[in-house]
Amino acid sequence: MVRKTKKMLDVEKRLRRPLERAIPEMLNEEGFTETAKSLKLSKATLNYWMLKLGIEVRRVALAPGEEIEIKRSTG
């Protein structure tokens, strides 16, 4: 388990959900810069939090008609 800072815990409290779930959802919906703004963080801090929490960002290029499926592990 990751030891979270007071600021991380404050943001979780404001969002009413764990950062491990909130950050990926926000990144997918808003993009990196807007997520940092929404969380009231610098982009460097957001990057550090993602590293600390084990959140990965992967870019995928799809040809027309291709789809991608995201599967969450339950473990």
Image (cartoon, grey):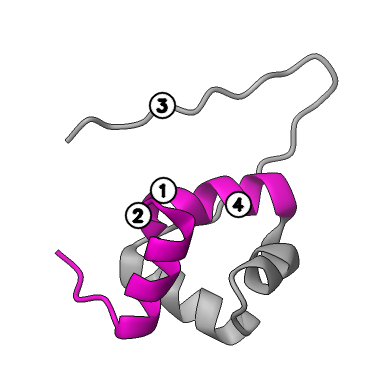
Q: Secondary structure at mark 4?
A: helix
- Give 22 or 51, whichever is nearer the viewer: 22
Q: Which region is colored magenta?
A: 1-30
Please tell me whether residue 10 is drawn above or below residue 72 in the rendered image: below
Q: From the image, tell me which residue sits under label 4.
A: 26
**Which is in the foreground here, disc 3 or disc 1?**
1
Picture quarter with the N terminus? bottom left
Contact? badges 1 and 2 (CB < 8 Å): yes
Q: CA distance from mark 3 to mark 2?
A: 19 Å
- Looking at the rendering, which quadrant does residue 10 occupy? bottom left
Identity, as a three-letter code, of the amino acid under mark 1: Arg
Determine whether the residue tagged by mark 2 lies in a helix, strand or loop.
loop
- Residue drawn at x 37%, y 55% is 20
Q: Earlier in the sequence, mark 3 or mark 2?
A: 2
Q: How many neighbours does mark 1 have within 10 angstroms: few (below 14), some (14-19), or many (20 or more)?
A: few
Q: Disc 1 marks which residue?
A: 21
